[in-house]
Image (cartoon, grey):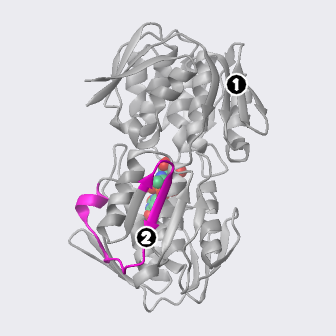
């Protein structure tokens, strides 16, 4: 197993190229299974999660080739309808195969995903939606057995604007030639990216960026070449690192439109940002002010930035309240940040961060993807050496993280544990 060794305390200067979005790529790969023929997805980040979904899709009989920042998929052959437990349990987004296979074949057998490091993550809304639209759905031996051949469309209101449920339902009805109206859907940029791709493939989906979608599918969806949007969470993570360590960094290719709330909060905290045609320039020279955040569905503050925000707020004068309303148990990083000297008290699903604190290096363990990112930020600012164990979590979601940080002046290297 690899670990990261970081000697902290240096400001960050230079350029970081923001990769394509992981969470946007996964639904696009699922959509490529629906259309017979060759689909090329561009600006794909080179990440373990992308390869994991690639393996699930290849298991179904679709050819998947990774070529630098492209994924080339050939879904000419009819895929198998079964996504087995062994593969699905490695990553929850494999559950997107349910919607994709229903659209392509009309039937699917997909393993129920398990929980994850920060608690149970149900899929009840995905299944309720399919049933409401006329599909049959049964659970058997840990698998979802679904048949959409009698699906009629109609109207479904999601209990909560779940990203995953919105993706699965969009995929499932994308070949249905009857109108479907989905209300209270997720509006994340990753959803809008998927809608654009499905529309280019031949579906008619209206309402992108809003909470109501009107969908008219097509049985004749066509393969295509399509590019992934930049990763707003990767950009936000580098922003928080520059904010914590000080410095001046250009986030090349980042899209400010997708980061409105995060940038507004950063500005409140005293981080300067300038939007240019190349991306977003982040500068931090002065002391930081404490700023409270509460996570919410898009366009609110993303839960995927909560851990990094806590790391940032350890530098701010005063008390910051950081509340996660989306994943209320997602605070495993707090105890590890405290090993580095952070002063944090937990009350329910709110972290009270007292600052500013001088962090000092220590061995710490990462427990999930964004928790790991917050430890990297803290370690980059800490005096002395920090060893971050279990780096495989970071490799799931951050492309060449240590190279990118090294290029902007950090002392960071990968070693064997
Ligand atoms: C996606 C992202 C993840 C991000 C999350 C919230 C991907 C691959 N993952 O996860 O990084 O943290 O959005 O922005 O894109 N819920 C239910 N029932 C359901 C589905 C969800 O109760 O059927 C609840 C969840 O427990 C959670 C909330 O809804 O409290 C949000 O979940 P959801 O938006 O579905 O997250 P994911 O799609 O799993």
Horizontally, residue 280 falls left or right of residue 177, namely right
Which of the 4 image quarters holds residue 101? bottom left
Q: Would residue 349 be counted in the magenta stretch?
A: no
Residue 240, image x and y in percent? 59, 28
Residue 392 is labelled as none
- The residue depicted at 46 percent of the width and 34 percent of the height is 400
Separation of disc 2 and disc 1 at Cα? 47 Å
Residue 185, image x and y in percent? 60, 66
Horizontally, residue 53 falls left or right of residue 82, namely right
Q: From this view, report whether residue 400 is shown above or below residue 74.
A: above
Q: For the N terminus, give its image quadrant.
A: top left
Residue 121, image x and y in percent? 39, 55
> Is 269 in front, or is 365?
365
Q: From this view, report whether residue 397 is shown above or below residue 248.
A: below
- The residue depicted at 38 percent of the width and 61 percent of the height is 94
Q: Would residue 84 be counted in the magenta stretch?
A: yes
- Residue 184 visible, this angle: no
Q: From this view, report whether residue 39 is shown above or below residue 401.
A: below
Under circle 2, the secondary element is strand
Horizontally, residue 13 falls left or right of residue 139, namely right
Under circle 1, the secondary element is helix
Query: The magenta stretch spans which residues?
Result: 66-89
Q: Residue tagged by mark 1? A: 269
Residue 30, image x and y in percent? 46, 66
Q: Residues within 10 Å of mark 1 (few under 14, many from 20)?
A: many
Residue 74 is labelled as 2
Which of the 4 image quarters holds residue 24? bottom right
- Residue 361 visible, this angle: yes
Q: For the C terminus, give its image quadrant.
A: top left
Horizontally, residue 119 falls left or right of residue 234, namely left
Q: From this view, report whether residue 219 is shown above or below residue 413.
A: below
């Amino acid at each position: 197993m690899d670990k990261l060794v970081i000697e902290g305390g240096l400001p960050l200067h230079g350029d970081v190229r923001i990769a394509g979005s992981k969470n946007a790529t996964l639904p696009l790969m699922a959509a490529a299974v629906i259309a017979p023929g060759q689909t090329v997805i561009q600006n794909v980040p080179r990440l373990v999660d992308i390869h994991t979904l690639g393996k699930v899709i290849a298991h179904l009989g679709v050819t998947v080739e990774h070529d630098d920042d492209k994924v080339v998929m050939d879904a000419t052959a009819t895929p198998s309808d079964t996504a087995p437990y062994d593969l699905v349990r490695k990553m929850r987004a494999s559950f997107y195969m349910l919607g994709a296979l229903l659209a392509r074949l009309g039937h699917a057998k997909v393993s129920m995903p398990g929980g994850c490091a920060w608690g149970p993550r149900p899929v009840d809304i995905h299944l309720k939606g399919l049933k409401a639209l006329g599909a049959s759905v049964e659970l058997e031996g840990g698998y979802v057995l679904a048949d959409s051949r009698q699906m009629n469309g109609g109207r479904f209101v999601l209990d909560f604007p779940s990203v995953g449920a919105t993706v699965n339902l969009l995929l499932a009805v994308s070949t249905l030639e009857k109108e479907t109206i989905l209300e209270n859907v997720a509006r994340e940029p990753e959803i809008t990216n998927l809608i654009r791709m499905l529309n280019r493939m031949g579906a008619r989906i209206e309402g992108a960026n809003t909470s109501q979608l009107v969908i008219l599918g097509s049985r004749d969806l066509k393969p295509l070449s399509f590019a992934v949007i930049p990763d707003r969470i990767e950009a936000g993570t580098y922003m928080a690192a520059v904010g914590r360590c000080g410095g001046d960094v250009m986030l090349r290719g980042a899209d400010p439109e997708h980061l409105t709330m995060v940038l507004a909060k950063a500005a409140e905290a005293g981080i300067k940002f300038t939007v240019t045609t190349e991306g977003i320039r982040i500068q931090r020279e002065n002391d930081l002010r404490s700023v409270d955040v509460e996570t919410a569905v898009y366009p609110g503050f993303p839960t995927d930035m909560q851990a990094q925000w806590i790391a940032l707020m350890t530098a701010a004068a005063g008390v910051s309240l950081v509340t996660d309303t989306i994943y209320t148990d997602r605070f495993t990083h707090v105890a590890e940040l405290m090993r580095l000297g952070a002063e944090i008290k937990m009350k329910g699903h709110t972290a009270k961060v007292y600052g500013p604190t001088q962090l000092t290096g220590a061995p710490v363990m990462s427990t999930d993807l964004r928790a790991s990112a917050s430890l990297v930020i803290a370690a980059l600012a800490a005096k002395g050496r920090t060893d971050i164990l279990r780096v495989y979590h970071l490799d799931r979601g951050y492309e060449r993280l240590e190279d990118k940080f090294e290029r902007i002046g950090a002392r960071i290297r990968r070693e064997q544990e």
